[in-house]
Image (cartoon, grey):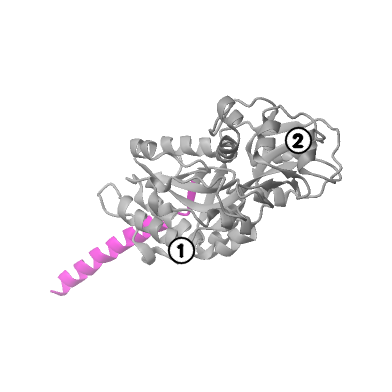
Amino acid sequence: MFGKIVSFAARMFLVLGLVSASHAEVKAINGAGATFPYPVYAKWAEAYHRATGIRLNYQSIGSGGGIRQIKKKTVDFGASDAPMKPEELDKYGLIQWPQVMGGVVPVVNLPGIEPGALRLDGKTLAAIFLGEIRTWNDPRIAALNPGLKLPGRKITVVHRSDGSGTTFIFTNYLTKVSPEWKRRVGNAKAVAWPTGIGGKGNEGVASYVKRVRGAIGYVEYAYALQNHMTYTRLRNRAGHFVAPTAASFQAAAAGAEWDKVRHFYLILTDQPGADAWPITGASFIIVYARAEHPERTAAVLRFFDWAFHHGGDLAESLDYVPMPPKVVERIEATWRKAIRGPDGAPVWTGGADRD
């Protein structure tokens, strides 16, 4: 009898040891994609490593690259600011969820113009990026900025050269406010730009705009802040000129009805709120619904669960908008229901996985 007890105890020790070893093997998780959320992901990664010893290796290569990498199964998760359509997710056996929200902002290099002093509306912004407005003292810009001394300097448009969710959000907005833009260019992660020079990533666009006098580009708001760039105000759908701030991003996100869409497919541009920033967007995480390596997918979910429940202050410090608690509940319910290992067992077990 004693031998059987010892044998049983040994077997249990072995099983527990294997489970612990499997869990312990995941010392780092690997992701790739959107540059839009990179500043907050980097902050979260640093804090999470201090708390758990687990690293996040994230390649800020653009949303198009992130989608390609997850489809090729070379990373544990992909990230995209352009949500994948439900039909495409179903085709590849993927699921996505919104992780954080923020804003895309036009930025300019106009010496003597303070951040927020220059005002634009959607049609004028589209005309600039179409190459129709070529100088900063154009009457259409001057009409929006009475009393502001505008230079006669040539406008240099700077856009993304890579497949980009930031571009998707920006062109989605321009498509909604400019029939001419919709007809000639349209909305996608990569478009045929009518004019301008291309920079890779938010970093590349920010670098070009800072170097070229008279330049205008578009970047995620955290890049504008960190690089001390001159952002513009924009006239929103309600007719108000608003500045990009966490409060104006929250105003845009306030009416988001995540529970009414499949696979969280929702785009937040040109929202109707009086204080809403018109180029607001969410950034999405993408994983396989049938996880070939469930321990790695579980590690991904633990990281983003930690971010939901402990990363809000870090997100807000960079002017991102954390997901509302009710949306987080729905996301984690989706994890429990939809993400399974090779044996069909759920990968996510809820609060038990939370530190």
Quadrant occupied by the N terminus: bottom left
Q: In this picture, which residue range is highlighted in magenta? A: 1-30
Q: How many marks?
A: 2
Tag 1: Cα neighbours inside 10 Å, few (<14), some, or many (≥20)? few
Is residue 58 on the magenta stretch? Answer: no
The span from disc 2 to disc 1 (Cα, nearest Å) is: 43 Å
Q: Nearer the viewer, residue 208 or 158?
A: 158
Q: Nearer the viewer, residue 25 or 150?
A: 150
Picture coordinates of residue 333, whole percent (x, y): 35, 58
For the point 47% across and 47% down, the residue is 285
333 vs 233: above or below:
below
Helix, strand or loop at mark 2: helix
Q: Indicate the quadrant containing the C terminus: top left, top right, bottom left or bottom right.
A: bottom left
- Whichever of callouts 2 and 1 sits on the residue coming sooner in the sequence is 2
In the picture, the disc for residue 236 is none
**Front-lying residue, 297 or 254:** 254
Residue lying at the far left in this picture: please name it.
Answer: 1
- Residue in view at x 80 percent, y 39 percent: 142
Q: Are marks 2 and 1 in contact (CB under 8 Å)?
A: no
Q: Position of residue 214 (x, y in %)?
A: 80, 35
Residue where numbered disc 2 is placed = 140
Q: Position of residue 223 (x, y in %)?
A: 68, 48
What percent of the width, then of the height, locates residue 206? Answer: 71, 41
- The residue that appears at 82% across and 45% down in the rendered structure is 146
- Numbered badge on residue 325: 1
Magenta residues: mostly which secondary structure?
helix
The three-letter amino acid code for the residue at tag 1 is Pro
Residue displayed at 27% across by 53% down: 345
Tell me the crowding category of disc 2: few under 14, some 14 to 19, or many 20 or more residues within 10 angstroms, Cα based.
some
Magenta region includes residue 14: yes
